[in-house]
Amino acid sequence: MSNQRRSYEQGHKPKCLVVVDDTAEGDRAVYYASRWALRVGGGVVMLRVIETEDRNQQWLGVADIMRAEAEEIANAALDRASGRANGIAAITPERVIREGDPGEQIIDVIDNDVDIAMLVLAASAGAEGPGPIITMLAKTAGTFPIPITVVPGNLSDLDIDALS
């Protein structure tokens, strides 16, 4: 069970959680979240999930190298997204890197920060569907602990400005 949200209580500020991935539409989520944070005086938490592969113990040294490379890639992605958010709204987002199943990690981050009031995701505008995280979360949307905002991947900065 999720912790009670405290986003708007004294001493707290609302935050939105954005999953930072390598998709083209991911920038739409960062843009929307940054504009939202600017508008409401809130914050942004950026999450990058490193999906773990089954690691064979005899290849532990290789697994450690792969993990270090994945963390380096994750930090670079968060650097880009944080720079973008700072350019949009002059904010410095919180950065979280987690390892494991994306759905489980998203829920855990929400459970551990009572100020997170919304999850912002961007949907792919392509024919392949909205994207794996949205597809996965759609199955649990009715029981999700916070609202989920899905930003269409085809919206321009001006379109998002008008909505946020």
Image (cartoon, rainbow, N blue to C red):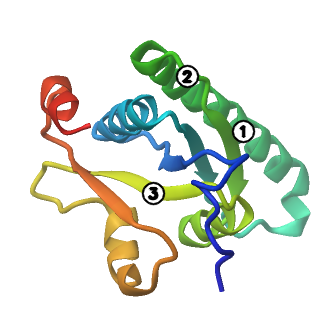
Residue 148, given in percent of the width and then of the height, sits at 37, 63
Asked if residue 140 is positioned above or below residue 16 in the image, the reply reads below
- Contact check, label 2 and label 3, Cβ < 8 Å: no
Reading the image, the residue beneath label 2 is: 91
Name the foreground residue: 133 vs 86.
86
Q: In this view, does 159 lie to the left or right of 58?
A: left
- Contact check, label 1 and label 3, Cβ < 8 Å: no
Please report the residue visible at 44 percent of the width from the left and 13 percent of the height from the top: 87
Q: Mark 2 vs mark 3: which is more N-terminal?
A: 2
Q: Distance between the residues labelled 1 and 3?
A: 23 Å
Q: Mark 1 vs mark 2: which is more N-terminal?
A: 1
Label 2 element class:
loop
Label 3 element class:
strand
Q: Residue furthest front?
A: 10
Please report the residue visible at 66 percent of the width from the left and 64 percent of the height from the top: 53
| Disc 3 packing (10 Å; few <14; some 14–19; many ≥20) | many
Please report the residue visible at 40 percent of the width from the left and 39 percent of the height from the top: 33
Question: What residue type is disc 1 on?
Answer: Glu
Label 1 element class:
helix
Reading the image, the residue beneath label 3 is: 119
| Disc 2 packing (10 Å; few <14; some 14–19; many ≥20) | many
Reading the image, the residue beneath label 1 is: 71
Q: In this view, does 62 lie to the left or right of 51?
A: right
**Closer to the camera: disc 1 or disc 3?**
3
Instruction: Quadrant for residue 70, please give it.
Output: top right
- Contact check, label 1 and label 2, Cβ < 8 Å: no
Position of the C terminus by quadrant? top left
Please report the residue visible at 28 percent of the width from the left and 56 percent of the height from the top: 150
Residue 146, given in percent of the width and then of the height, sits at 48, 69
Q: How far apart are marks 1 and 2 (CA)?
A: 23 Å
Residue 63, given in percent of the width and then of the height, sits at 80, 52
Position of the N terminus by quadrant? bottom right
